[in-house]
């Protein structure tokens, strides 16, 4: 036994002394109770082990923590067993780490999780308790999953979130950290949370209340508006977008005089979305003074006279006076006025013309781009489908988006104002004319699963791209969208594309096999999505057995037949 292990040997009085000796080295400093030499390192380790045991044995036990209350019950029905097993697979799948454009034929299960959660929530299922940690971890890493994941996780997830700091986002994302959005039924509790809660809790409370009782949410906000910080006022004001209506106008008019420029701008934007508001009327007068039809020419033409100054009234109504770098002040002011003016005013101002006729008019002096871009923003803000159709134009037009849609992003926003079926027809026509190279953003606004016209157009365009002999990687974004958005019933149409095609002489080497692999992954994913939906379907109740037949009463014999 070494000296330090002997009970008669002196032991160091301080842990720091042992640490210092270890840092300096036993060649420079001999451990207490030891002698210089080859045994010194062993003696130091023995002393450290003994001191560790002594330190641990000398600790006083801490006061026992209060046992947490049991997790609340979740009254929703349990998942079908097959769906519960599928959820485990979806949550344990991780995206591949291999680089390059080749992804193989296996579906990306994590990309199917959002649709699975949406379907599970539509059926009203409760999450299995054992899956909650993995579900919260997935939602922590992907903010797009959080609303659906927390809805599916239910109250037990909030119970867990209070015990693990990594999951605190669940408390911030839920009204009151788990309280149900029962504000109209419990005004005292709502008022207390509004006055005492954390900022994120107050935002969640106001949002939840606004969706159920817009007037109550507005009254709650007005009660403390004067004492809120500017950045908080901006976030609270943004919550009024849900359920925005004429009753909000008096409060928003007061916000036009706010100390914060951003708050004033947001209030003005909300008021301009109300075509009958006083601000919309003021903007209509200002915009109409800048735009007119010149009837003295051979062909009627729109002429524009942009504002020469931005006065105090314009600034109060949300016009930003300072133009961005590289932008002319007058065109900047004009765009803001036209964007905020109600679109209904232009028919009266421009000779009773329809939106299509107005958009078709030539615009003098190079103002067409600025004017039409402002009308695009107005159509999106006011959700005006007639103006959106006029500005989009025909999908087969050479300009592929109409004169007012200056970018794919604007076309996508305009499409968002149209009914889902009309939106799908327009996007399908665009793809048939212009292919997939510019269709990615437009496909993102189509309802999922894609309507039949969109699905057919995408599959046909992918087939054309395959026949062209290029690699499929340039279409990987569209292919990924197709895996998530194509109707699973389209899988049968794709079977003919699974074979490796004959490659033309000018094709990229091996492109055919890569395309076959990509289509195989697409078909496998579509069939898996169909299986997911089948697994989530509630079990069909067994058919009731027919009642046993009673005794048959004898009947009188009829007349004998000859």
Image (cartoon, grey):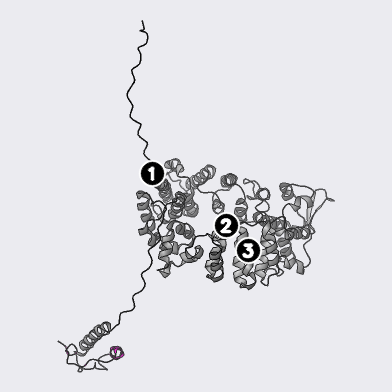
Sequence order check, earlier mark of 1 and 2: 2
| Camera-side residue of 514 and 93 | 93
Q: Crowding at label 2, few (<14), some or many (≥20) Cα neighbours within 10 Å?
A: some
Q: Is residue 310 visible?
A: no
Cα distance between the residues tagged 1 and 3: 46 Å
The residue where tag 3 is placed is: 219
Q: In the picture provided, is 155 more to the left or to the right than 234? A: left
The residue where tag 1 is placed is: 539
In this rendering, which labeled residue sits more in front, label 1 or label 3?
3
Q: Is 388 inside the magenta-drawn segment?
A: no
Cα distance between the residues tagged 1 and 2: 33 Å
Q: Position of residue 80 (x, y in %)?
A: 37, 49
**Element under label 1?**
loop
The residue where tag 2 is placed is: 211
Q: Are marks 2 and 3 in contact (CB under 8 Å)?
A: no
Cα distance between the residues tagged 2 and 3: 14 Å
């Amino acid at each position: 036994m070494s000296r330090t292990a002997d009970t008669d040997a002196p032991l160091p009085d301080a842990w720091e002394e042992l640490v210092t000796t270890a840092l300096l080295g036993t060649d420079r400093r001999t451990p207490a109770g030891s002698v210089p030499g080859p045994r010194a390192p062993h003696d130091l380790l023995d002393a450290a082990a003994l001191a560790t045991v002594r330190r641990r044995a000398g600790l006083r036990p801490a006061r026992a923590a209060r046992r947490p209350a049991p997790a609340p019950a979740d009254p929703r029905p349990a998942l079908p067993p097959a769906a519960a097993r599928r959820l485990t697979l979806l949550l344990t799948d991780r995206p591949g780490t291999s680089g390059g454009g080749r992804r193989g034929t296996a579906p990306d299960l994590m990309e199917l999780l959002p649709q699975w959660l949406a379907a599970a929530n539509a059926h009203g299922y409760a999450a299995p308790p054992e899956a909650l940690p993995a579900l919260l971890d997935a939602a922590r890493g992907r903010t797009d999953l959080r609303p659906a994941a927390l809805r599916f996780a239910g109250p037990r997830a909030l119970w867990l979130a209070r015990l693990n700091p990594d999951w605190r986002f669940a408390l911030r994302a839920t009204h009151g950290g788990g309280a149900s959005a029962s504000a109209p039924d419990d005004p005292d509790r709502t008022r207390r949370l509004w006055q005492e809660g954390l900022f994120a809790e107050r935002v969640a409370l106001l949002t939840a209340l606004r969706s159920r009782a817009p007037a109550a949410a507005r009254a709650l906000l007005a009660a403390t508006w004067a004492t809120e910080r500017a950045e908080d006022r901006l976030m609270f004001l943004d919550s009024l977008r849900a359920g925005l209506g004429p009753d909000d106008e008096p409060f928003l008019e007061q916000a036009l005089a706010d100390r914060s420029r951003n708050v004033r701008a947001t209030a003005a934007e909300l008021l301009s979305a109300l075509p009958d508001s006083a601000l919309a009327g003021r903007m209509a007068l200002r915009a109409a003074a800048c735009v007119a039809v010149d009837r003295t020419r051979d062909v009627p033409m729109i002429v524009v006279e942009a504002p020469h100054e931005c006065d105090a009234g314009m600034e109060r109504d949300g016009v930003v006076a300072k133009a961005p770098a590289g932008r002319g002040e007058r065109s900047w002011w004009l765009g803001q006025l036209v964007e905020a003016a109600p679109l209904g005013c232009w028919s009266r101002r421009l000779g009773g013309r329809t939106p299509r006729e107005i958009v078709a008019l030539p615009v003098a002096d190079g103002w067409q781009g600025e004017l039409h871009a402002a009308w695009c923003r107005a159509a999106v803000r006011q959700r005006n489908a007639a103006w959106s159709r006029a500005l989009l134009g025909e999908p087969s037009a050479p300009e592929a988006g109409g004169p007012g849609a200056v970018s794919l992003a604007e076309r996508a926003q305009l499409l968002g104002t149209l009914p889902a079926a009309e939106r799908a027809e327009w996007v399908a026509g665009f793809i048939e004319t212009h292919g997939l190279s510019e269709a990615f953003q437009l496909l993102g606004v189509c309802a999922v699963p894609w309507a039949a016209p969109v699905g057919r157009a995408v599959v046909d365009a992918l087939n054309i791209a395959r026949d062209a002999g290029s690699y499929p990687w340039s279409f990987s974004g569209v292919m990924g969208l197709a895996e998530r958005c194509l109707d699973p019933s389209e899988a049968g149409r794709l079977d003919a594309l699974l074979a490796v095609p004959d490659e033309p002489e000018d094709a990229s080497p091996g492109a055919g096999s890569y395309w076959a692999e990509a289509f195989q992954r697409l078909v496998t994913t579509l069939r898996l999505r169909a299986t997911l939906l089948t697994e989530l379907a509630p079990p069909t109740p067994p058919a009731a057995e027919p009642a046993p037949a009673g005794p048959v009463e004898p009947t009188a014999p009829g007349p004998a037949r000859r």
